[in-house]
Amino acid sequence: MSLRRFGLAFGVAASLLAMPARAETVRAAGTGIGIAMVRLLAEQYRRDHPDTPVWVPESVGTAGAVKGLATGKLDVGILARPLKAGEVEGGASVPICRTPLVFYINAERRDVALNRRDLPALFANALPPFPGGEVRVLLRPPSDTGFIRLLEAYPDLAPTVTAARDARGAVLALTDQEAMDAVETSRTLLTFGAFAPLLAEKRKLIAVPLDGVAPSLETLENGHRLPEVPLVLALPPSPSAQARAFVDYARSPAASSLLRASGCLPVTGP
């Protein structure tokens, strides 16, 4: 295990150990895609439920959420996918919303637009400069949800992305927040990830048009075929009444406008 991966694993363990005892607090943790949105939901929820605080630490990833649910450290897991069979026996997955997956860049780089044919050169670090200068891709780990979906949408990119990781010798950004920090402070870096945290965290980042389409919640809602990722709240086998009430609230009409403002299309129906 590399030092960076050891550090990430240690950070996940430390975050779970530092979580408060249950009492009336709902302990929710998981993927960086949903951290800011769930914090905003928690703030809104507590206005009407002042006796039920919802505690949301920094990202521990979907894997950390699954571990926290399985060990009883969490009341609610924040996942970028539903629970898999056998991960949390008797647990429940509740889809809340879905968000586009986009290439994004510093908000000052409005000169950048991509076509499907540009992607191999982008990942090979051979893309010609745009009017505002060069663009370089920031890589993510093979386990990153965004990059998994990217390669599902464009499977022919897999060898180029793998070669790029091998050539760089290291993954440059492990978490969504780390990736956004890096791109936000650079005029050349660009990466692929969830649209929602760009809005929920009020980042100085913009989605890059791809094949003439500017990715947004509206393009997803209007039927454009974009890679996307769900935000799922997961419950353990015997959830507390407070945890279930918070998850129910996240699926309610009262939460839908907040989710939409955060770039995540609310799930409708039962």
Image (cartoon, helix red, strand yellow):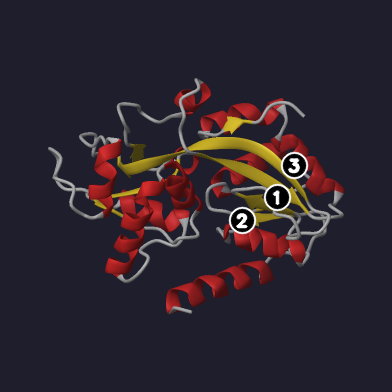
- Whether residue 168 is visible here, answered yes or no, is yes
Amino acid bearing label 3: Val
Coordinates of residue 69 in the picture (x, y in percent): 74, 60
Mark linked to residue 247: 3
Q: Are marks 3 and 1 in contact (CB under 8 Å)?
A: no
Q: Earlier in the sequence, mark 3 or mark 2?
A: 2
The residue under the point 76% across, 64% down is 70
Coordinates of residue 242 in the picture (x, y in percent): 82, 47
Amino acid bearing label 1: Val
The residue under the point 80% across, 55% down is 236
Coordinates of residue 194 in the picture (x, y in percent): 47, 43
Q: Earlier in the sequence, mark 2 or mark 1?
A: 2
- Whether residue 186 is visible here, answered yes or no, is no
Quarter of the C terminus within the rendering: top right
Residue under label 1, please give it: 54
Residue under label 2, please give it: 30
Q: CA distance from mark 3 to mark 1?
A: 11 Å
Looking at the image, residue 111 lies above or below residue 192: above
The residue under the point 34% across, 37% down is 206
Q: Secondary structure at mark 2?
A: strand
Q: Residues within 10 Å of mark 1 (few under 14, many from 20)?
A: many
Given residues 136 and 35, the one toward you in this image is: 136
Amino acid bearing label 2: Gly
The residue under the point 32% across, 33% down is 210
In the picture, residue 62 is in which quadrant?
Answer: bottom right
Q: Are marks 2 and 1 in contact (CB under 8 Å)?
A: no
Coordinates of residue 224 in the picture (x, y in percent): 46, 25
